[in-house]
Image: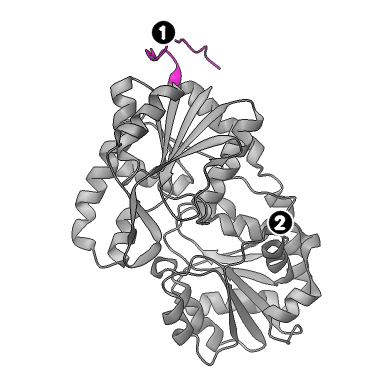
Amino acid sequence: MRIIVVTETFLPHIDGIVTRLTQTITHLRRMGHDALIIAPYAEGTPSEFQGAKIVTIPSVSYPKYPDIRLGLPLLLPSAEREITSFQPDIIHVASPAFVGLGPALSALRRRVPLVASYHVQYPEYIQQYGLGAFTGFVRWYLRTIHNWAKINLATSTQMAQDLTAHGVKRVQVWRPGVDAETYHPSMASAELRNKLTEGHPEDFLLVCVSRLAVEKSIDRLAPVLRQLTGVRLAIIGDGPARANLEKVFEGLPVIFTGMIKDKNVLAGAYASADVFAFLSSTETLGLVALEAMAAGTPVVVAKRGGLPDLVIDNQTGYLVEPEDVTQIVAAVQTLQQNPALLAAFRSNARAHAEEYSWSQTTTQLFQYYIQATQNQKVNHRNKAVSVPAD
């Protein structure tokens, strides 16, 4: 199959969406499919990935978050020619917003099946950035694009329910995956733990891996730390909220490491911690929690969005109300004070994460592609293409 993948963010930027898409493209290529990637231009964007050409769209940076690129919403003739030359069987738009509009319209015009996936809670995000007056318009805009698609993919059960409740049709859940070979308990490092605890490896170590942005609500961990003794926090990641967060956590046993781009070092950070803590309420999935569990690290995460799909409460970690400081403190203390329970949670977390693989989720995605193309007449090769049922 010839597949165009359209994304609002791509390399060199790193986040959960980019991780998912790079893994997806890697496995689609291994399965023998051809791919073309359409993404907003950013300095350092490669010309290809895994043999798939990358077509960049003119973009500007978002002033409040310079790493985020806002791409031109309508395709230039050069991009249209790339689509024509590629002759796609399907166009998959991930988190349609700016860049996604042009390819979605192109799919409709060419009668190429469109698949859309929902990775970002834009209506919630814009409220965090003081643009709440546009929430209604954003919901209408997203609903319109998604309802052009043959299939809409949500990354969790909660997101599927939310999309359906807001009028999006033909919604399915797209399973997550994790690289359980890289993120592994064996990656634990005494040297790394010593660095993350600033020379106090005997303390109980929490780690939080995230973009440092207001919507991630990392500041919720500050009042938790104030009520704990013998507990330290390593915040891994970078973003526009870093300077403010450093003020919020001033005087607390917290280290900001910046972004760790080396996957092996990041895996070591997960595995060297005692608990992964993440209290964001806006996660459509929360891939970082799955990476932590693959590394054998129990999680204390918000009972919101996609996170409940990943975590078995009281077995692989705890699902908590993200603003309930007392509940969060109790969850951390329970694991801090019970080494045997912590060990059991570690084992459970690893075993649970092993049930997810990028190979399985890409196979599932391809089945959705087949469903989207069933009985669809594709005219780009001057013939009708009929795809048999599963």
From the viewer's perspective, tell me whether residue 17 is left or right of residue 232.
left
- For badge 2, the amino acid type reads Tyr
Say if residue 315 shows up in the picture: no
Looking at the rendered structure, the number of numbered marks drawn on it comes to: 2
Residue at 46% over, 10% down: 386
Q: Is residue 135 magenta?
A: no
Q: Residues within 10 Å of mark 1 (few under 14, many from 20)?
A: few
Quick check: marks 2 and 1 in contact, CB under 8 Å?
no
Report x, y in % for residue 79. Answer: 36, 34
Residue 301 vertical position relative to residue 86 in the rendered view, above or below: below
Report x, y in % for residue 360. Answer: 64, 36
Which mark is on residue 159?
Answer: none
Marks 2 and 1, Cα distance to the nearest angstrom?
Answer: 44 Å
Closest to the observer, 100 or 388: 100
Give the residue pinned by disc 2. 183
Residue 87 vertical position relative to residue 340 in the rendered view, above or below: above
| Magenta stretch prevailing secondary structure | loop
Whichever of labels 2 and 1 marks the residue nearer the N terminus, that label is 2
Q: Residues within 10 Å of mark 2 (few under 14, many from 20)?
A: many
Give the residue pinned by disc 1. 384
Report x, y in % for residue 128. Answer: 32, 66
Report x, y in % for residue 88. Answer: 44, 23
Residue 348 vertical position relative to residue 112 in the rendered view, above or below: below
Q: Residue 68: which quarter of the image?
A: bottom left
Residue at 41% over, 49% down: 41
From the viewer's perspective, tell me whether residue 342 is left or right of residue 158.
right
In magenta, the rendered stretch is 373-390
Q: Is residue 388 magenta?
A: yes
- For badge 1, the amino acid type reads Ala
Say if residue 309 shows up in the picture: yes
Residue at 72% over, 60% down: 264
